[in-house]
Amino acid sequence: MLKRGMPACGLFVSAAAIAICASSSAFAQGAAAEAGVETVVVFGQGEARQTQTITQSDITAAVPGTSPLEVISKLPGVNFQSADPYGIYEWSTRISIRGFNQNQLGFTLDDVPLGDMSYGNYNGLHISRAISSENIARTDLAQGTGALGTASTSNLGGTLAFHSRDPGEEAGIYGSAAYGSFDTTHDFIRLDTGEAGTGTSAYVSYGFQQADKWKGYGLQKQQQVNTKLVQKLGDNARLTAFLNWSARRENDYQDMSLDMINRLGYKWDNISNNWPLAVQVANAYLSGTTLPAPFKTVDDAYYNASGLRNDAIGGVTGDWSVMDNLQLKATFYGHNNTGQGLWYTPYVPTSALIPGAAPISIRTTEYGINRYGAIGSAILTLGDHTIEGGVWYENNNFHQARRYYGLNADGKNRTSLQFQRDPLATQWAFLFNTTTLVFHIEDDWQVSDALKVTYGFKTQTVNNSGHLLASQITAPFLPLSANQFTGGKIGTSTGFLPQVGAVYQLNDVSEVFADYARNQRAFVSAGTDGPFSTTQPGFNAISGSLKPETSDTVEGGYRFHFDGLTGDIAAYYVNFQNRLLATTVGAGIVGNPSALSNVGGVTSKGIEAAATWRFFQDAWLYGSYSYNDSTYDDNVYDGTGALVMATKGKTTVDAPRNILNAEIGYDDDTLFGRLGVQYMSKRYFTYENDQSVPGHTLVSASLGYRLHTDSDLTNGLEIQVNAENLFNERYVATIGSTGFVARGDAQTLLPGAPQSFYVTLRKSF
């Protein structure tokens, strides 16, 4: 059975595109501002590492509600995929950077950690739930070595720091409304108070999005409320606070294999509109009789599946310039999450417990996160030295459970987009606690007018514990192994994770940079992932010997800006060590369980290049290219020494070798538009590289008009029409949705969305 253990880009460029998708080096920011040119992609001038920034002007060029991860997908080194048109369907959403997967990256919002943003996240939440994209001011991407002060213990290969907009100085209302393919509706409104005489300003916004699935039957919808307050405290200090809430409800698409795509078609999906067929399939499977056509296995399609999430996240930050050379900053934050992943499973019939009931039940994986933390930092300037140090502490309690809920014969007593109550059985329920303590210090030394050297390190201590809360066996189809995990502790601690770099300004228009960093990824605290996702004997066997994943990254590059041409080029080398993978521990353990093991390393090397050419005052051409060569260093063996996977020298899964982006845009303040193209080469979804999905090319286009009138009602009103996947290419978007396998075809693929069209209206008052 292949189904989840926890259970865009309908990028219709919105009509508020204020100078869309221009790209410029930070060298040229001052000159660009003087010339009236908006900078959108900013190449990190003065930084000793590869970094770029996407600003709000590029984010507002995307369809309202589009994931901010989709917006950054044109930056070099980024591989972003999603099976829905908007990039927010979380089961399918994947981002990798330089071959590192999503759970090996670091993510923050206004310095508050978002965890590893994986599905069923145990220590955070996805950015699409954390904040409405309309309220993101900028996104900072560091492809290889994130800042030492980033609040993350998962960032082996880069960081994404999201920053919310501040309230406007003037009172006002901003609204947008969009409609498009698949009955998509997106509405957003924000009210700014303006700045009062007390130095207080604030805003509150509400967003609603709903769309039909592009294939099959079901909805994907979300509500969001964002609030932010800024309080000035004299000339040298200010207090900011935000509180965001979201409710996400999404029906799932069916995970597919290459065989299923070829046999059943690109648009095959769950049979949520046909309960009698779902019952027929389940009865045939349970009785061992022939499945109805066109089913080959019971996993070809399920009746339904969904993901439900409620989140509230908030933070308070104080920023105080104590003296001209000393600045203090402190952030206190909290996050609460409740979630369920639902799957209508034919493997566990309700009728086994309740005669006459359905031969299907609802299996859930249930989540509850309660975490709080604090981040403090100080910056001291002493002559040519800027010394920055800080500490981050977090305490996280994570509840996770596997439960089954009964269905009546007609299946109408429960619905897929509501939280389930009154289970038939609890297979297991765990409580995990994770405490994190990270300290860092670094020095930026301005050696000369041209040369700056940075050096520093961080320490990291993470303690993970878990124990079984409940295991209620009420049916013979829910057996409990005598080796069930019941409790234990594991952790990671290191006193020295160094980072060093330098940037040298060659002249007024160019500079070179280089840096090195060592990072470590903490263990996951969950029953469906990480070292706790095994039996008690399996955990006992690894708890004293398992090593955390680490990476050593070296990168260097060149940045430039010449008369309308700006960009950079970089090269990197990464040595990834102690890779974790679940393998059989060995014959000496009762039951010979599968548990995490260190299975060797990965070597990655590549080049990245990006540039913008503003060939006319109102027109530009942007392009980026990424080449990545990531290969496994070792074969995989189990605890007895037997070969499990012949992976040495094979390309890492979901790591395309080539990614090319090109975009041409125009904006004369009245007429605006763009044409974008992205090419991605093939990707492997087996560790031994015997199965892959082919490369694909996607084209998007937009055209908009901005009104200039004497009427306050219509002046500034914008309308835009967008087309995504313009030539209706059929391609596989997400791979590894249910994990990767050693070899052979697997039900772990999700086809990408077809051609779609959208219209957006936006207005500020």
Image: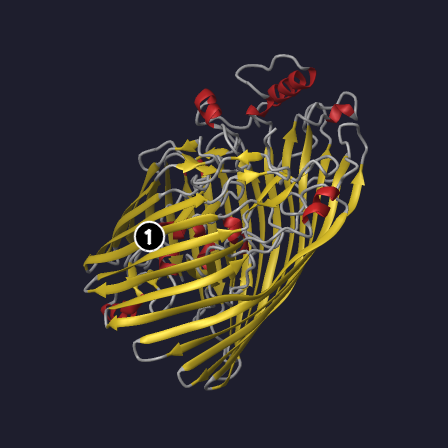
Q: Residue furthest front?
A: 641
Residue 630 in sight in this render: yes
The answer to which of 524 and 181 lies nearer the viewer is 524
State which quarter of the image contains the C terminus. Answer: bottom left
Vertical placement of 122 versus 416: above or below?
below
Residue at x-position 47% and y-position 36%? 685
Q: Is residue 91 left or right of residue 658?
A: right
* Colour option used: secondary structure
Quadrant of residue 347 within the rendered picture = top right
- List the residue tagged with mark 1: 607
Vertical placement of 406 versus 196: above or below?
above
Q: Is residue 138 left or right of residue 665?
A: right
Vertical placement of 110 versus 233: above or below?
above
Q: Residue furthest top?
A: 290
Q: Amino acid at mark 1?
A: Ile
Residue 8 in percent (x, y) is at 42, 44
Residue 53 in sight in this render: no
Q: Neighbour class for label 1 at 10 Å: few (<14), some, many (≥20)? A: many
Q: Is residue 313 left or right of residue 536?
A: left
Residue at x-position 36% and y-position 59%? 57
State which quarter of the image contains the N terminus. Answer: top right
Quadrant of residue 512 within the rendered picture = bottom left
Vertical placement of 416 versus 455: above or below?
above
Residue 25 in percent (x, y) is at 29, 64
Residue 40 in percent (x, y) is at 33, 60
The answer to which of 266 and 304 lies nearer the viewer is 266
The answer to which of 558 and 275 lies nearer the viewer is 558
- Label 1 secondary element: strand
Q: How many marks?
A: 1
Quadrant of residue 711 within the rendered picture = bottom left
